[in-house]
Image (cartoon, rainbow, N blue to C red):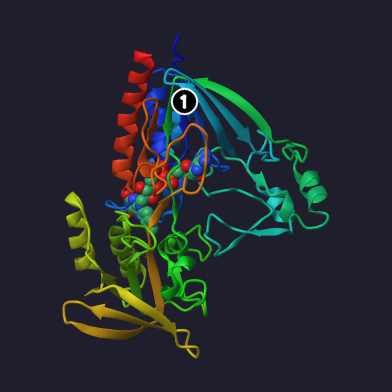
Amino acid sequence: MANSSILVVGGGISGITSAIEAAEMEVDVYLVESEPTLGGRVGQLRYYFPKLCPPTCGLEINYKRMKANPHLTIYTMTEVLEISGAPGSYKVKLKQNPRFVNDNCTCCGECEKVCEGERISRFDFGLGKTKAIYLPSPMAFPARYVLDKSALAPGDLEKIMSVCQYHAIDPDMKEEVFELEVGAIIWATGWQPYDATKIDNLGYGKFNNVITNMQVERMASPWGPTGGEIKRPSDGEVPTKVAFVQCAGSRDENHLPYCSYICCLASLKHSLYFAEKYPNTECTIFYIDIRTPGRYEKFLNRATNEAKIKFVKGKVAKIEEDPSTKDLLVTAEDTLSGRRVTERFNMVILALGMQPSTIGKTIPGLSLDENGFVVETDGIIPVGCAKKPLDVMTSNETATGAVLKALQVIKRA
Ligand SMILES: Cc1cc2nc3c(=O)[nH]c(=O)nc-3n(C[C@H](O)[C@H](O)[C@H](O)COP(=O)(O)OP(=O)(O)OC[C@H]3O[C@@H](n4cnc5c(N)ncnc54)[C@H](O)[C@@H]3O)c2cc1C
């Protein structure tokens, strides 16, 4: 007999939507997330287009629906090791890593205050640090701290354990491998930024003031590493002239051969961040084509009306640094005038493309295409950016559609 439960892998907006839609149909759902919190990339944004809502907007409502639903079981810090079986009766082997903090945690933060060891924050894309014991996101769900034992300073463990009146720190937690039986699988593992250091001519990692679009999101966030200020890493000054380099990695046979779909919209959104906070900052967008599909044309109009944007149609050929000021000299072929232009900027933002987080991974039972996106098979349905580069709205549409497909798989089996 077919198993009627669904496994959702990945707890970003696509996975959350899939899990809620299915659980609200009274189907038993297991939602598995590799990080200590749900939320995915949306949780790292300052605002999301088109309405420019903060991520709390959508996520909080979803978290409320999840808490209220008895059909949903959530596993954080968990990854799929192997899938076997067939549509209607899959066996999935999973591994859960230890959090070293149990359910008693109330997020009082006393442990963080006394802890001295620190670690680089992956959530802030290396722009800041957290303590060794930390809340994984300002909107952490589940609302619980996590301990990175490798980052503890001598004596930290004793201090954080003695200050925790809820007995929530458990340094002896162990990794657990377990199995689930499900009828269908929705794959929602999303995307990661393309590795900017692979694009030699754009100077990321060599020049301090060349940063990425996701680093801008973290800087612009009031809970981010700069408290909401978008500043030059070299001297902490607010830039007055900023260049955006579109298609950084995307639409390039040497890197990502596809369009990442949202990067033009993201740079327009970032121009609005500058307009809101620093109205004197001038933004220059170097582009191949400006792509604002469908109704997003309105967003292009809004950004060009509200922000100070100059558009240069041309792919950036190279970026050099003026060592005395740490300004950047950006050279591009201006295809409309036919001239090679070199212009000075205080900061460069790379509109980095999105790569599926499945890239380079092998999970027995899961099929990937040549770019690492998940290929749909009868009972394994990819959604959101695991399927292709997408915005939030369309990711949610794929998630809702996938639930219907998953229910059909279970019914047919
Ligand atoms: C700079 C930038 C700005 C953007 N701004 C906007 C915007 O303003 N508006 C908009 O609509 N879109 C925006 N986007 C696009 C948006 O980020 C995506 O549409 C959205 O993140 C897709 O959600 P997702 O759930 O598919 O993937 P993700 O958000 O990537 O979530 C995937 C989840 O799966 C988890 N995961 C990964 N691997 C595993 C694994 N092996 N096992 C278990 N879990 C795993 C991850 O930890 C994550 O929680 C932007 C993108 C960029 C690059």
Is 402 placed left or right of 60 in the picture? left
- Residue at the bottom extreme? 324
Q: Nearer the viewer, residue 239 or 202?
A: 202
Query: Does any portion of residue 18 appear in the rendered image?
Result: yes
**Crowd band around label 1 with a 10 angstrom C-alpha radius: few (<14), some (14–19), many (20+):** few
Residue at 50% x, 64% y: name it: 227
Residue at which label 1 appears:
68
Query: Does any portion of residue 72 appear in the rendered image?
Result: no
Residue at 43% x, 64% y: name it: 216
> Which amino acid type is shown beneath numbered disc 1?
Ala
82 above or below 49? above
Q: Nearer the viewer, residue 375 or 78?
A: 375
Q: Is mark 1 within 8 Å of ligand 1?
A: no
Q: State the quadrant of the C terminus.
A: top left
Residue at 63% x, 35% y: name it: 96
x, y (%) of residue 372? 42, 46
Q: State the quadrant of the N terminus.
A: top left
